[in-house]
Image (cartoon, coloured by chain):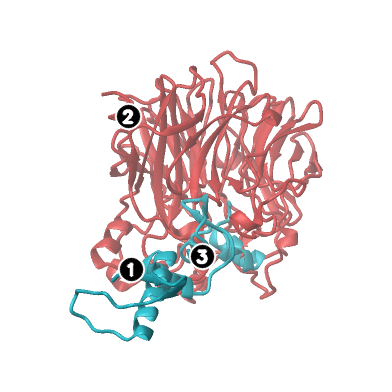
Amino acid sequence: MVDFSSDPARRGFFSPQRYDAEILECEVQGSLPADLVGTFVRLGGEWYYPPSKPDDAMLHTDGYVSTFRFKDGRVSYKGKFVRTPRFRANLKAGRQLFGYYRNRFTDDPSVQGIDGTVSNTTPLVHGGKLFTLKEDSLPQQIDPETLDTIGAWDFDGKYKSQTFTAHPKIDPFTGEMIAYGYEATGPASKDVFVYAMDKAGRVMRETRFEVPYVSVMHDIALTEKHILFPFGGYVTSMERLREGKIHWGWDGSKESYIGIMPRDGDGKDIRWFKGPERCMMHTFNAQTIGSKVVLYAPFYDSNFFPFFPNVDGSPWDPSKAKGYVRRYTFDLNSKKDSWEEEILFPLPIGDLGRIDPRYLTQEIRYAFTGFSDPTRPFDEARAGNLRGRVTNSYARFDLHANKIDRYFPGDTHSLQECCLIPRSADAPEGDGYLIGVASNYAEMRSELIIADAQRLEEGDIARVILPFRAGPQVHGIWVTPDELAPFPKAGGIDA
Amino acid sequence: MSWERSNGQSSVQRNCDCGLEATRRQMLLGACSGVLLITLGGAEGAIGAAMPHAEGGVLSFYRDEPWLDGTGRAVPWHPPHGCRAAREQGALSDEMLRRIDCYI
């Protein structure tokens, strides 16, 4: 019997939706742009069964992949739980068999040897295949038409790491993918394996190195010449795992590190730079300019996740979990192992930042992310009193003009991660559509908003209305019709 | 039953061929009751009138649309527990809200 009643927090809009869904043609308010052709693929997670540990991380929810497919001014929706080995084992048993986030010592003995990934973080399209990713395991390949789960993909046996990042980088100029796995040889191992795959998805190069200490290496940054590996603060060990604790703790006394390795080099060539306490989760972009490397990232001052507790036992402090648009400069000619950090805008932001994907590795002018704008209203009577703790706006940061443009979806809404879709292959940087799923707390439904990325202040052009909640999203990607073949048939639209 | 008036004064005389017998008091009571029921719209209306109710219309909501019940006798419709979205989560601490969903 499935029973969430002992969890009072997961009610209303936040109660797990627990169903696969399909709408052959969605309701639209406004007018969809005729040049918006392709698919928005989202990935997030829901608890299909209640967690066995009430304080487990929400990052441990069962992966749910969904698509909005746009064609001829119309749009369809499909959503499905990723049928991981874990999902199928739980379903067979009718209950949660897995313990804490990434701690196999806390699982039910019956699932020893079963891949415990939830594959719930980022979708990826590369080499003509669609994947769901989570950094604790291999990619899960997904049928792009049905969203059925095909299974784990190890690149024809050439990928040797036990783990695969949720944030590989695809060079927009060459199609090469840089991917890596940390804790590559097992939980709490210091090993990192780095791979380059050609645009067909074939493994071309591998290199390995060890990190100064085992931590969350969630994202990297890529330039034309270098790969940047940031991490800091989160700690783990086999001792911690054997004690039955959740995988990560936070140690604010630990230094942050950013490793810089030449793209054509190997692990011996990595140079480590150190800095103060930072929570380094996602990056915007990076660029190599002569002997300097510049990184733009929405890093936090300190621990962002309360379910990864402080190792010294102190309570989680939300006032320290503030993210900003930051610029880091590294001088590769200097003997110093420190970096220069600048906060470019004093506005606290969410760290699900995006750029125009065509400008990865290049100089960028614009960065996009969500944030909580306290100057905007929230209708507590209709939506519930969340006390200003929602992402209620998108921002376009103009790094050249030092200016912020903002989009507001309405006073009963919050916003999930945005995605920038270039208007055309040769459109100027940032010229296109900014899309993202909005949660409508008054109507108990989700809406995909489409705004002109150059005119955010004017509001959205169109909204795709779902008659239900679409479920949480971590990351989403835009896929053009030529990136994935055969392209999914929506049934109704292609009939 | 028929009514007859004589000498300018109303009087009641039983003139019924239904076979029932009734006193004058009973006939008056029955007539008054009948008028009252007709006025109230029948037995159901009488019962409703006897129940407490608000003066004027009742503003209610059905499927998120406002609905004015002009009879003044309807009970306002309240959505099921938890239906109003984020009402439960308003009481949560920052930490508990972040634990449910980091990316809200």
Q: Colour of chain A?
A: red
Residue linked to disc 1:
A2
Dot placed on the residue nearer the N-terminal end, 1 or 2: 1
Q: Kindly identify the residue that appears in the image at 44 percent across and 40 percent down.
A: A123
Chain designation of label 2 = A
Separation (CA) of disc 2 from disc 3: 37 Å
Do tags 3 and 1 sit on the same chain? Answer: yes
Q: Is residue A415 visible?
A: yes
User: Which of the 4 image quadrants contains residue A216?
Assistant: bottom right
In the displayed structure, would residue A420 be above or below residue A121? Answer: above
* Letter of the chain in cyan: B
The quarter of the image holding the C terminus of chain A is top left
Name the residue at the top extreme: A426
Name the residue at the front extreme: B7
Who is closer to the viewer here, B64 or A419? B64
Dot placed on the residue nearer the N-terminal end, 3 or 1: 1
Chain designation of label 1 = A
Q: Kindly identify the residue that appears in the image at 35 percent across and 78 percent down.
A: B30
Dot placed on the residue nearer the N-terminal end, 2 or 3: 3
